[in-house]
Amino acid sequence: MRSFTAGKNDDGVRLLRFCEKVCPTMPKSLMRKAFRNKRIKINGKKQDENYRLVIGDLIELYINDEFFTLENKDTFKPVEHNNLNIIYEDDNIILVNKPFGLLCHSDNKNEPNLIEMILSYLYENGQYSPEKENSFTPALCNRIDQGTEGIVIAAKNYRALADINRVIRDNQIEKTYMCVTDKPVKDGKYTAFLKRDKTAKKVSVTKHQVADSKEIITIFNTLDKKDNLNLVQCTLITGRTHQIRAHLAFLGSPIIGDRKYGRPFKGLESQLLCAYKLKFKNIPEGLSVYYLSGKEFTVDNNSVAEFYNKA
């Protein structure tokens, strides 16, 4: 038997999720059997798997030791994070400007990635103690392509993660991008349909709906023009995989340097696309991040604007 005391980052977590986190190798059938046989208790009493933990709850798991995870402190290894570009931070979230070429998550090739850098930063500053956590690790709330620059949100605690995910799901965060194209696109709101090809890791866009496609809506506004370059602002109404890149290519104005939906550009390793602005809309009262309502964050000095200004 092992016991745990629910802490701040366990508050509100479903009991089943907590158990799956601390017993990652336990088959689901055995986990549910443990619930039925009263081998999982809260404060000495049987609880349903959907029970939401409360700070201070005593969680008793009468489960074989072989199913419990190794201590996080034995597996967590800080990485170099001096280049982490933080644009906003509070007790609940941290906003980081991810540079071109950096992965958001690990790809199992031991390449640097954003979440490991954020965890190392929080660990060094005493905001993350893996040895004290039962079921939560700070996590990214959104992600952008490796070849795209821009704002990524990370949650420092479980409540903030759940609330930010709800806000994103309810379309209460407006995401605006900046890109450079060599062909103009007429200002306006465009609707089309996008279909993913997971094998090719690519999407296709059509004017009319086809099987397995989903509607995409994007607003394009030209910020500036010079020579053969167009600095374009892109506002997402829907947020699909590769939406902006594929939508612009479909309209005949692919992003400069986009090797997947356009063509290579000398001196560029990736597309000139930056998630440079993020605005929180009307976040419902009662959520932990309610105070962010109406706040807007921008990365004005980004690589896309720099390329355009120097061209």
Image: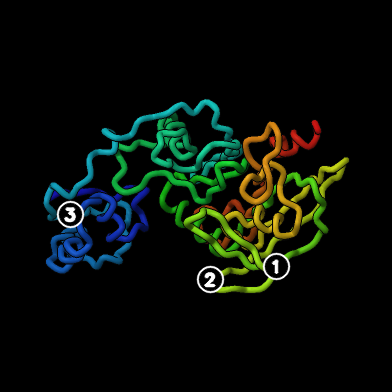
Instruction: Count neighbours of disc 1 (C-alpha within 10 A) and say few if under 14, some if 14 to 19, many if 20 or more.
Output: some
First reached walking from the N terminus: tag 1 or tag 2 = 1
Q: Relative to residue 305, is residue 163 depicted above or below?
A: below
From where the camera sits, is residue 122 visible? Answer: no
Which residue appears at 50% of the width and 57% of the height?
A: 165
As drawn, is 57 to the left or to the right of 177?
Answer: left
Amino acid type for the residue under numbered disc 3? Glu
Q: Which residue is mark 1?
A: 191
Q: Which mark is residue 212?
A: 2
User: Residue 238 is drawn in which quadrant?
Assistant: bottom right
Which residue appears at 62% of the width and 69% of the height?
A: 215
First reached walking from the N terminus: tag 1 or tag 3 = 3
Amino acid type for the residue under numbered disc 1? Thr
Residues tagged 1 and 2 counted as in contact (Cβ below 8 A): no
Query: Separation of disc 3 and disc 2 at Cα?
Result: 45 Å
x then y, percent, for residue 242: 60, 54
Q: Secondary structure under badge 1?
A: strand
Amino acid type for the residue under numbered disc 2? Asp
Q: Which residue is mark 3?
A: 60
Q: Nearer the viewer, residue 182 or 90?
A: 182
User: Residue 79 is drawn in which quadrant?
Assistant: top left
Which residue appears at 64% of the width and 63% of the height?
A: 205
Q: Nearer the viewer, mark 3 or mark 2?
A: 2
x then y, percent, for residue 4: 22, 48
Query: Separation of disc 1 and disc 2 at Cα?
Result: 16 Å
